Every structure is written in C-alpha cells, then in structure tokens.
C-alpha cells in the first residue's frame, strides 16, 4: 500500500470517528512531513485523495480543513434500523418489480444509477483476454474432465492462497467454482433448505436473495439492519428462539443495499451464535475486496471452526464482469455441494476459469484492486457531494466504507417508487427501497433508494441526472414538466 494511501486512510478514520471535526484545520504539509517522516509529495498526495473523497477542502493561503456537511442534507448517520413490518415468516413475491427495474438498466442510453453492476470500464478486460489466450494455448485436454464440478485446480489453489494471505483458512478441496456468485448462493440455499423452510435475511436486503427464496418456495424472516454495523446478533438470537430457521443469508461486508460493515466482534458473535443453534450461514461476500480503507475486512468465514459458514463470492465485482466465475468455500458441506453442482450445471466454463487463474498467477491483481478502490472511493465522494448539493433538506445518506452503492433516505413525505417512475421517464434508473424487502408496502423503505456510484469514470451524465433527481424529489415530481425530455436536456 503506498504511503500516501496509508496516511489518507488514517486521517479518514479520524474524521469518521470525530477525532477531526468539521471545520478543523489539518496539519500543514510541513508539520505532517516532519511528524510522519514522509516526503512533502506524500502529504500532498494524501490530502489530494482526501479532497477527492469529499472529506477535506483546501482554502487559499489557509491550508486544508475538514469539510463540513452541507446544510441541504445530513451526511450521516442514518436513522437506527426500524423493526420490519412483520417479524413473522412470510412468503416472498417481488419478481415483477425487480424485472421492471433491471430491464431499464440494460439500455446503455439510460443513466445507470439503479444498476447492480459496476462499469466494465473499470476492469482490465484486455489483459484478461490475453491471459485467457495464453492459458488455452497450453491447455492439457485431460484437465477438461479432471476439473469438472469442483472447478479448475489451479484457480482453486490461487483462491485458497489469497484467502490464507488475508488470514482466512480455506482448503482448496472445500472450494467449488460456480457460474458467478449467484450460483454459489443458490446452490447453498438449495442444499440447506426445503420448500416451506424459513430463512433469516437482513432488512433491507439484496433483492436477488429475495428472488431466490421466492423461486424455491421459502419463507423469509427479516432482521433489522443498522446502516453502519449490520445486524445485531442479539436480535438474531431472539428470532432463533421464536422460529425454526433453516439457514441465514447475510452480507456482513458492505451490505447491499445499505453498505454496512459488521465489526469483527459482531461477526465472531454471529458465527458462535449460529454454531450453538446448528444453523448454517450463507455468507455473501462479493464486495469484500472493494474496501476503501487500508485492510480487507475479514469475512464471517474467518471465525468459522465448525464448517457451517458457506462463504460465497465471485470475481465479477472486482476483476472480471461478464466472465461469470464465482466460488463457494462450503466447509463441511463441500462434498454435498459438489454433488449438487454436478446434478445442476455440471461445470463452470473452462476458458473463463483459465483466464482468471493465469491473471492471478501473473501477480497484477492487487495492483488492479488498489486502483479500483481509489477510483470507487473518489466516485463515492463525488456522488455524496452531488446528493448533498441537489437533494432537498432533510435527506439522509450513508457514507459506506466499501462497495459502490449509496443508500439515500428522502425527507418525510418522499416516495421513492414515485421518484423511480418519474426518473424512468427521463432516462434515469434508480433502485427504490421497495425492491429490498419481502413486504411490498414496507413503510420503512418507502422513502429510501439505492444509487450506484460504480459508473464509468468521467461519465458526464451523472451530475445532471442527480441534479434532476434532486429537483424531482424536492418538487414532488414537477421539476421537469415534459417527461419525454432527457436528463441531459430539460433536467440539466
């Protein structure tokens, strides 16, 4: 990690903890250089990075200061999590709304603020293609049969090695390569449940989790989720005492849609609680590599000693979108999960696996990740500042420490579903809060929406689109009288 990134991350933590307060002056470059024993260039780079994240501002002839939140919006914290509409298990039905939102994001002319995916322009696709070509030229045909079901042996060893370096003990033999993280999650769910079973999920939660429960005839019990620290294990303990829960599906690192990050002590307590009750955990960790700090947060899998955490992730969000290479470290369930994989899709596409295995072996992955994390942190700060500038007073928003989603809560009277409909007419997509609950009419999420800041760097449409959304939110949808006009014109 470059020295200036370490310095910037340390100061970012101090600002978020309140040790450095809004309006407070940072040490001068000379003072920081002397106290940190680094070069002036390192200090300037660190301050530039903090400024790009929207955390500090430079004042001519005065120095650098912690930036104050604008009066138009409250930067953080969001309100504490409210209790879901029902704490009873319920059937899930959200498919129509999800398909409506996802359909709009496939059109490249639509501003992709509601997309679930980062921009493909952020990834080394040309280098991956070269790696794939090299690997295919020397492919031993016999490997095509030997690597069925479990996946390419070289790739599984590369994954296990990376996990070990991060402090997570994973045996290559417990890893099953899948068609993206969604197959890993879906296989885990199918392995652990039967129709009618109850699955505990976060609230709000990723709509694909709700779709999977709906598809398999499962019931959901929702756990209130803090915008900063995720679920409370004590709340889960109460749920486990009332319901016969077959499995938990949780996202401890940079939860989608909130962006929350469970502290390590909560993760440890969570895994211990589930082990006592004999309830397995399906851990969705697709955003774990996209942290904005200096260290990758440990997944819950790091605290698993019973083999009951099925750790699911993929390369789609951090390296290779479209390659559809994911994996699950299934613990004691690995053999059963391999059998289920064989009975369903049999194997994952070999060329994609070979390309990623070769890329990892070349040693450029961490360099790519450092650049990607810096870019996402910069784009988060830019979107945060635009929402503060354009959305109505009383808007609340998170400042996640990773991922590429920003959770926004409109003021009293706001209606995210109505805003979604108006924005769609203007060629702007967003993800309304109703997508993220099994209860369509959940009043807690009526004013909430998720915005994607993982768009292409330099996309000139983002700022005018956010300004248009802000005007619509402030004026109840009357800011743009002609909905046929685009966000780039009438709502600019």
Image: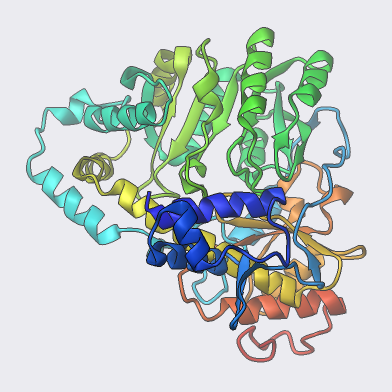
Q: Nearer the viewer, residue 40 or 225?
A: 40
**The C terminus: image quadrant:** bottom right
Q: Nearer the viewer, residue 51 or 443?
A: 51
Name which residue lies at 23% across and 46% down.
359
Name which residue lies at 41% across and 53% down.
37
- Quadrant in the rendering for residue 428: bottom right
Q: How is the image coloured?
A: rainbow
> Residue 133, percent across and down?
14, 51
Q: Count the numbered circles shown.
A: 0
For the question of whether residue 136 can be seen, the reply is yes
> Residue 404, percent across and down?
56, 56
- Quadrant in the rendering for residue 353: top left
Q: Nearer the viewer, residue 230 or 184?
A: 230
Residue 265 position (above or below residue 118): above
Q: Horizontal placement of 133 versus 186: left or right?
A: left
> Residue 180, percent across and down?
42, 41
For the question of whether residue 194 can be seen, the reply is no
Name which residue lies at 67% across and 8% down.
276
Q: Horizontal placement of 468 versus 284: left or right?
A: right
> Residue 229, percent across and down?
70, 38
Q: Horizontal placement of 119 versus 58: left or right?
A: left
Residue 247 position (above or below residue 25): above
Residue 463 position (above or below residue 329): below
């Amino acid at each position: 990690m470059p020295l200036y990134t370490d310095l910037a991350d340390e100061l970012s933590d101090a600002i978020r903890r309140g040790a450095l307060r809004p309006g407070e002056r940072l040490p001068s470059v000379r003072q920081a250089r002397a106290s940190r024993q680094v070069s002036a260039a390192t200090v300037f780079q660190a301050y530039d990075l903090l400024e790009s994240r929207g955390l500090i501002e430079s004042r001519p002839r005065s120095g650098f200061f912690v930036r104050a939140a604008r009066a138009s919006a409250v930067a953080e914290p969001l309100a504490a999590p409210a209790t879901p509409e029902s704490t009873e298990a319920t059937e899930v039905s959200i498919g129509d709304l999800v398909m409506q939102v996802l359909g709009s994001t496939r059109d490249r002319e639509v501003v992709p603020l509601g997309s679930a995916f980062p921009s493909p322009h952020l990834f080394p696709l040309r280098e991956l293609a070269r790696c794939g070509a090299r690997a295919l030229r020397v492919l031993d045909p016999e490997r095509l049969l030997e690597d069925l079901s479990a996946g390419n042996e070289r790739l599984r060893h590369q994954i296990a090695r990376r996990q070990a370096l991060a402090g997570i003990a994973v045996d290559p033999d417990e890893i099953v390569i899948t068609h993206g993280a969604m197959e890993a999650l879906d296989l885990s769910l199918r392995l652990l449940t039967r129709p009618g079973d109850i699955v505990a999920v976060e609230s709000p939660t990723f709509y694909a989790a709700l779709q999977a429960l709906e598809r398999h005839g499962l019931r959901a019990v929702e756990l209130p989720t803090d915008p900063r620290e995720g679920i409370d294990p004590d709340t889960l303990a109460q749920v486990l005492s009332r319901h016969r829960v077959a499995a938990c599906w949780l996202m401890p690192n940079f939860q989608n849609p909130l962006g929350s990050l469970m502290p390590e002590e909560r993760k440890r307590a969570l895994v211990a609680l589930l082990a006592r009750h004999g309830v397995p955990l399906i851990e969705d960790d697709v955003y774990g590599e996209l942290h904005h700090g200096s260290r990758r947060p440990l997944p819950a899998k790091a605290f698993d000693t019973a083999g009951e955490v099925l750790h699911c992730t993929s390369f789609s969000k951090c390296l290779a979108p479209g390659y559809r290479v994911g994996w699950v470290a299934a613990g004691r369930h690995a053999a059963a999960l391999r059998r289920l994989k064989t009975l369903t899709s049999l194997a994952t596409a070999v060329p994609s696996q070979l390309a990623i295995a070769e890329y990892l072996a070349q040693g450029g992955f961490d360099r790519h990740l450092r650049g990607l994390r810096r870019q996402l942190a910069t784009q988060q700060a830019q979107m945060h500042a635009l929402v503060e500038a354009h959305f109505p007073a009383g808007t609340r928003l998170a400042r996640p420490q990773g991922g590429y989603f920003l959770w926004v809560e409109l003021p009293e009277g706001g209606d995210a579903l109505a805003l979604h409909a108006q924005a769609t007419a203007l060629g702007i997509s967003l993800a309304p809060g109703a997508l993220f609950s099994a209860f369509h009419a959940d009043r807690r999420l009526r004013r909430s929406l998720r915005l994607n800041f993982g768009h292409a760097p330099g996309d000139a449409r983002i700022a005018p689109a956010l300004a248009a959304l802000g005007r619509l939110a402030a004026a109840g949808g009357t800011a743009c009288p002609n909905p046929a006009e685009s966000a780039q014109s009438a709502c600019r």
